[in-house]
Amino acid sequence: MTTDPLPESVELHEELAAYLDGELDAQAVKRVEERLGRDPAYQAELQRLERAWDLLDRLPRATVNEAFTKTTIEMVAVAASEDAAAVQSAWPRRQRRQQLLGGLGVMAAGLLGFVVGHWLWPSPNEQLLRDLSVLENFELYYQADNIDFLRLLDEQGLFAEGESDHAG
Amino acid sequence: MTVSESSAQRYELQDPDVRLMLEVRDDNAAAFDELMLRYQNRLVTVLEHLVGRREQAEDLAQEVFLRVYRARKRYVAGAKFSTWLYTIANHVAANARRSSSRRPEVNLTVRPNDSTGASALDKMALAASGAMPTRQLDKAELRDIVRAALGELNERQRLAVLLSKFEDMSYADIAATMEMSPQAVKSLLSRARVNLKQILEPYLQNGTRPSE
């Protein structure tokens, strides 16, 4: 009997295929079965789909031989030993990298600590360094009576760097 | 893929192959051998009908098992084991198809042996038209015709059919394997069934084919 195509063929076939595959919910199953009972064309289409599907049972099923199993296990064993070797060879490299990163980390932390510490607690030596020329000529300043006299000495180059030896 | 703990526990509880794979993850070699023995014939069957050649199917199956082993440490029970396995197989077969497409002499479409040069399906068409006398099919011929009909489907339809027919997978499992929606699988399988019906229709009537 040839009854194809039915008007709503795409939806119809999806419905019939899902029915045959057991993928419809109870309500849809009921709807399909009601129609199967009253629509011979619908029923014939279902049977054609089912018979074509059943012919797939004629397709041969493979049975592999022992060589396949053995070769596969050997391939996996080789892969396992390669993995193990890769992990081993990666270990010293990883260690070196970790050591390097650790060293850089310590250096960075030290530098940061120095900068922060320097900012929070300035060194008292810095003030001494700034006042070094005064300290070096302290004896001369001490003997001066007033600041105008010192300015006069300065204008004459008496306190210039490297001049103090000549002045003394 | 993110897998909830409850879903992983459910798969572990329900699927013995998931439990075996978790043992493989813990470097249990015997568990891997057991899984391989359980799946090797099934996998080669699907791959053979998918790619069309037994030798290539075996090579691909070995590649799949190798990938399973190599992925063992990352394995999480996010699906049935068979779904996970055939997802890998689908990727391996797709890679093989891409490689083959760069070598035009390789033809993945299955054709039955035919000394006349015409495909069995061409003869089917003639038989259906009544232009040639008919005779009863023998088993081998029918098998070749069905194999050729399967080969006429596009690759996605073919894989969906194989997973449904040979692996008894639900639409949801096929969808997960082929990375598509269950609704798309429903449409795909429906079209595949219609195509198979149309190709095989002459044989559905009276089991005959053209005489040679």
Image: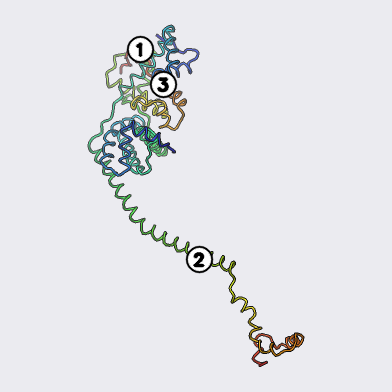
x and y percent of residue A147 in the render? 75, 85
User: Which quadrant of the figure contains the C terminus of chain A?
Assistant: bottom right
* Way the structure is coloured: rainbow
Give A166 or B67, whichever is nearer the viewer: A166
What numbered label is drawn on residue A110?
A: 2
x and y percent of residue A47 in the render? 38, 13
- Which residue is denoted by mark 1 in the rendering? B205
Mark 3: which amino acid?
Glu
- Image mark 3: chain: A
Mark 2: which amino acid?
Gly
Q: Are marks 3 and 1 in contact (CB under 8 Å)?
A: no
Q: Are marks 2 and 1 in contact (CB under 8 Å)?
A: no
Q: Quadrant of residue B50?
A: top left
Tell me the mark number nearer the camera, choosing from 3 and 1: 3
- Which residue is denoted by mark 3 in the rendering? A23
Tell me the mark number nearer the camera, choosing from 2 and 3: 2
Say which element carries label 3: loop
Q: Residues within 10 Å of mark 1 (few under 14, many from 20)?
A: few
Mark 1: which amino acid?
Gln
Q: Compute the Cα span from label 2 to label 3.
A: 68 Å
Q: Is residue B26 left or right of residue B191?
A: left
User: Which quadrant of the figure contains the N terminus of chain A?
Assistant: top left
Q: Compute the Cα span from label 2 to label 1.
A: 89 Å
Q: Compute the Cα span from label 3 to label 1.
A: 28 Å
> Can residue B104 be seen at all in this image of the molecule?
no
